[in-house]
Image (cartoon, rainbow, N blue to C red):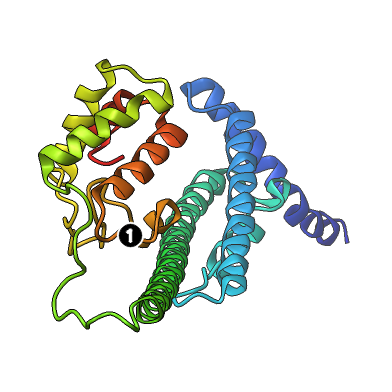
Amino acid sequence: MVGTTASAVVPTAAPVMQRAAFVSAAASSGAQPLSSIEQAATDAVADAQNVVTDAATTTADVSASALPIDGETRVDTTALRSRIAGLDDTDVIPTLLLPDLTERLADETENVRAATGDLRGRLEAAQAQKAAEEEAARIAAEEAAAAEAAAAEEAAAAERAAEERAAQRSSGSSASSSAPVSSGAPAASGDNSPAGAKSTARSMLGGYGWGDDQFSCLESLWNKESGWNYQAYNSGSGAFGIPQALPGSKMASAGGDWQTSAATQISWGLGYISGRYGTPCGAWGHSQSTGWY
């Protein structure tokens, strides 16, 4: 009975005896202390558990994103969790086995960490691509809306111009119903030559409180715009006359003969310059810096 009792106690005491023997051997040989070995195992388990959590989070993020991602879309942590369980309680593991088990756990931890990093990188790439596609779609929509608005404005301007031309034809027809029909352009009124137009403009400056010093700026400005030609027409923009009014029908506010009278065009042009730039030199300075006035 004594022998049976003693033999029954051996399995329980064996790890303790082995641990004691290992500690004694370590002390005499200068090997790694037992406490250091156990701490390394504990640290490895903690690191592995963090990696398992990160893998689960990344897998969940991929699933929630619903984005098309090439390759495996989940991280398998089965083997790592099994190794964590094998090292979860260092008190019942023979000390001599701890270093090897810890190393195996560390290796599997790195495998899962790498797989998690790869999956996270592919998720972020898919998210970046989606963001770029959405931004491109937003820009395209804005450009389409701007183009549509510009087309609508252009159509409205063309419609207004057509209405103005119709009104002018109607007015001209009423005014000249008893006169012979002209087959060409409207007859000019007054001295419309460039020299005559410049003389007319110079005589009008005083009405705005401007001196001859402003005439040189005005001369340069309208030399550039029209060459002082009362019939000048810009086919690209539709601007007309000496001051290049856009549209030319604006000058009707200065007189019904705006198409045939340099004086009427100049009167309108000086009023425009006064209201917008203050002086001809102000308008000329703006034209020089921007190309238009």
Q: Is residue 36 above or below residue 138?
A: above
**Which quadrant holds residue 165?**
bottom left
Q: Position of residue 65 (x, y in %)?
A: 57, 71
Q: Quadrant of the N terminus?
A: bottom right
Horizontal side of 3 relative to 106 (left or right) equals right
Q: Position of residue 218 (x, y in %)?
A: 24, 30
Horizontal side of 182 relative to 22 (left or right) equals left
Q: Is residue 291 visible?
A: yes
Nearer to the camera, 291 or 221: 221
Q: Is residue 289 above or below residue 188?
A: above
Nearer to the camera, 263 or 282: 263
Q: Position of residue 214 (x, y in %)?
A: 28, 21
Circle 1 is placed at which residue position? 257
Horizontal side of 20 relative to 66 (left or right) equals right
Secondary structure under tag 1 reads: loop
Q: Residue furthest right?
A: 1
Query: Who's the residue at 62% across and 72% down the image?
Result: 64
Query: Who's the residue at 40% across and 80% down the image?
Result: 174
Could you classify mark 1 by the number of other residues whose Cα lies within 10 Å: few (under 14), some (14-19), or many (20 or more)?
some
Q: Position of residue 120 (x, y in %)?
A: 48, 59
- Type of amino acid under label 1: Asp
**Which quadrant holds residue 159?**
bottom left
Q: Quadrant of the C terminus?
A: top left
Q: Is residue 289 visible?
A: no
Query: Who's the residue at 18% across and 35% down the image?
Result: 198
